[in-house]
Image (cartoon, grey):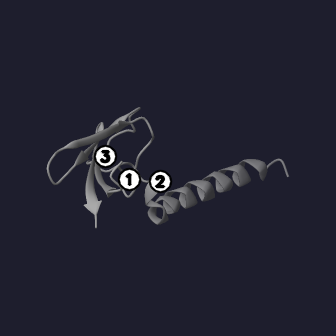
């Protein structure tokens, strides 16, 4: 049994490495960030893409697809995040 132990450990590690690489294909959130996105920031400025107006500043972690409702009940969706700016488009 002692002679089989190293072979089983190597086989187990090979299986784990094989399946961990396959998981990232099925879950895009596990893939590395795209060129448009960088590492998460501590805070973001929400900027309207239509007129380049700064809407607000937040310290909440954001991601593409999140929505924001302003004080006038306008709904915006985040379309792109670059460094500390989250660009939004108004949803009609």
State which quadrant residue 82 falls in: top left
Identity of the residue drawn at 67% across and 55% down: 12
> Which residue lies under the disc numbered 2?
30
> Which residue lies under the disc numbered 1?
69
- Mark 2 or mark 3: which is in front? 3
> Which residue lies under the disc numbered 3?
37
Residue 80: image location, x then y, percent: 28, 52
Between residue 33 and residue 83, name the one nearer to us.
83
Between residue 14 and residue 77, name the one nearer to us.
77
For marks 3 and 1, the one nearer the N-term is 3
Identity of the residue drawn at 19% across and 52% down: 49
Give the structural element (helix, strand or loop) at label 3: loop
Give the numbered dot on residue 57.
none
- Mark 3 or mark 1: which is in front? 1
State which quadrant residue 41 falls in: top left
Whether residue 45 appears in this view of the structure is no
Kindly report the distance in space between the C-alpha atoms of the residues bearing marks 2 and 1.
28 Å
For marks 2 and 1, the one nearer the N-term is 2
Q: Is label 2 in contact with label 3 (beta carbons under 8 Å)?
A: no
Between residue 59 and residue 63, name the one nearer to us.
59
Q: Is 26 on the left or on the right of 71, as rendered? A: right
The quadrant of the picture occupied by the C terminus is bottom left
Whether residue 34 appears in this view of the structure is yes
Kindly report the distance in space between the C-alpha atoms of the residues bearing marks 2 and 3.
14 Å
For marks 2 and 3, the one nearer the N-term is 2
Give the structural element (helix, strand or loop) at label 2: helix
Residue 19: image location, x then y, percent: 57, 61
Residue 6: image location, x then y, percent: 72, 47
Mark 3 neighbour class, 10 Å CA radius: few under 14, some 14 to 19, many 20 or more: some
């Amino acid at each position: 049994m002692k002679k089989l132990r190293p072979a089983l450990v190597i086989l187990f590690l090979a299986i784990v490495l094989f399946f961990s690489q396959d998981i990232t294909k099925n879950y895009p959130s596990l893939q590395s960030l795209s060129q448009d996105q960088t590492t998460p920031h501590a805070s973001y400025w929400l900027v309207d893409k239509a007129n380049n107006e700064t809407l607000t500043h937040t310290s909440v972690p954001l991601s593409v697809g999140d929505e924001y409702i302003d004080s006038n009940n306008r709904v915006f969706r985040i379309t792109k995040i670059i460094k500390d700016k989250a660009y939004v488009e108004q949803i009609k």
